[in-house]
């Protein structure tokens, strides 16, 4: 392999691939990146056997070929040269080393490599069932769903998001047992057949890193999901488990409804974080029929307390007092970039629904949060 490549362009693609690589992989080859030079580009691949990314950048290929190189050394070297204008000369040597040098420079690096044959076989989507949708639609849904994806190692079934595809409809659902996100978009979506797929958290996180804009192609085959955006190809195994029956969690009998300014309540909650208890992170919201809300934080450990006040843009129903984990509210308010937020409540012991106020055409986003009981 012998190529010339722009260091900055290579660094852009490397930054995506490095998130896939297992830094403490038990199989040595999984700590490596696969580099394949052919035609007019350099292809990079990274995998942990569960999630795989293939991406490419333009390159002047003098001699095609493929090699694998340790990600933890190759990545920092390319990054260090990415601020220079000179392209990088990269070639494999007779001693199976990877030679790296900025064109016209005296710096030289020789890195240990492993042969391409040792690298895991990479999959292709081939004749898989596919559909195309706007990448911004999928990105927003994934960002909203990631907020409540579970992290509990003992609850495998909640460590991903349920993706539901139907004709003209994309739905994502996630939960960590304390909160639940339901986000749905309706539009020109030509799904070959209805499908439910449980997508791992890491796959969703890696998708978010890909550039937005244009369309994204989703394919499903042999318990895998394939995501293709331009020259970037991400795929992973789907989770082989049953997602909880989320329909039972979304309340339908909430009779207290408040409309609040999103930035106003977010600003107040962020100010109160320094006072809240480390363990419970509790904040009490007291809504009055007159349309005012008081936010109260009391720290039993230190004796500190904080009070903030907010005038609602609208309120329906009797007074209600309800306590939440403030971090859960901040998470939602951060990813729901609308001017107003709609809050539906029943009483202090029932889950509440938070929704961004946005046009119906932009889809539904329901964030269900269980209240805290501190007595």
Image (spheres, helix red, strand yellow):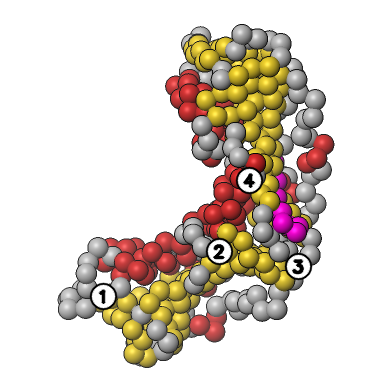
CA separation in Å, label 4 and label 1: 46 Å
CA separation in Å, label 1 and label 3: 45 Å
Q: Position of residue 79 (x, y in %)?
A: 32, 63
> In this rendering, which labeled residue sits more in front, label 4 or label 2?
4
State which tag comes first along the sequence, 4 or 2: 2
Query: Which residue is labeled 2 in the image?
Result: 215
* Quarter of the figure that contains the N terminus: bottom left
Tag 4 near tag 1, CB within 8 Å: no
> In this rendering, which labeled residue sits more in front, label 4 or label 3?
4
CA separation in Å, label 1 and label 2: 31 Å
Report the disc number at residue 87. 1
Query: Which residue is labeled 3 in the image?
Result: 192
Query: Which residue is labeled 4 in the image?
Result: 361
* Magenta-colored span: 165-175
Q: Position of residue 362 (x, y in %)?
A: 61, 45
CA separation in Å, label 4 and label 2: 18 Å
């Amino acid at each position: 392999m012998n190529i010339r490549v722009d260091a900055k362009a290579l660094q852009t693609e490397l930054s995506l691939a490095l998130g896939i690589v297992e830094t403490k992989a038990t199989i040595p080859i999984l700590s490596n990146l696969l580099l394949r030079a052919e035609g007019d580009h350099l292809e990079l691949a990274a995998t942990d056997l569960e999630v795989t990314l293939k991406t490419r950048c333009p390159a002047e290929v003098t001699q095609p070929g493929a090699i694998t190189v340790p990600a933890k050394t190759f990545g920092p070297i390319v990054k260090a040269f990415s601020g220079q204008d000179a392209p990088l000369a990269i070639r494999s040597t007779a001693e199976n080393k990877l030679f790296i040098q900025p064109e016209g420079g005296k710096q030289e690096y020789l890195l240990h490599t492993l042969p391409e044959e040792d690298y895991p076989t990479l999959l292709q989507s081939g004749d898989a069932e596919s559909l195309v949708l706007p990448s911004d639609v999928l990105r927003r849904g994934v960002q909203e769903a990631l907020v409540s994806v579970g992290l509990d190692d003992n609850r495998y079934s909640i460590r991903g998001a349920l993706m539901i595809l139907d004709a003209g409809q994309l739905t994502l659902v996630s939960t960590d047992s304390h909160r639940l996100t339901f986000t749905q978009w309706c539009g020109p979506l030509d799904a070959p057949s209805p499908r439910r797929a449980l997508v791992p958290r890491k796959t969703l996180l890696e998708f978010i890193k890909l550039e937005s804009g244009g369309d994204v192609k989703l394919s499903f085959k042999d318990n895998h999901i394939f995501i293709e955006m331009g020259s970037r190809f991400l795929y992973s195994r789907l989770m082989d488990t049953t997602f909880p029956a989320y329909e039972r969690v979304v309340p339908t009998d909430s009779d207290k409804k408040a409309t609040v300014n999103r930035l106003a309540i977010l600003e107040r909650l962020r100010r109160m974080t320094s006072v809240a208890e480390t363990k419970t992170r509790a904040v009490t919201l007291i809504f009055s029929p007159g349309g005012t809300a008081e936010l109260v934080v009391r720290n039993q450990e230190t004796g500190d307390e904080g009070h903030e006040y907010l005038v609602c843009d609208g309120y329906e129903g009797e007074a209600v007092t309800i306590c939440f984990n403030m971090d859960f509210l901040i998470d939602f308010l951060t990813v729901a970039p609308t001017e107003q937020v709609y809050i539906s409540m029943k009483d202090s012991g029932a889950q509440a629904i938070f929704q961004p106020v946005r046009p119906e055409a932009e889809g539904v986003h329901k964030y269900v949060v269980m209240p805290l009981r501190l007595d």
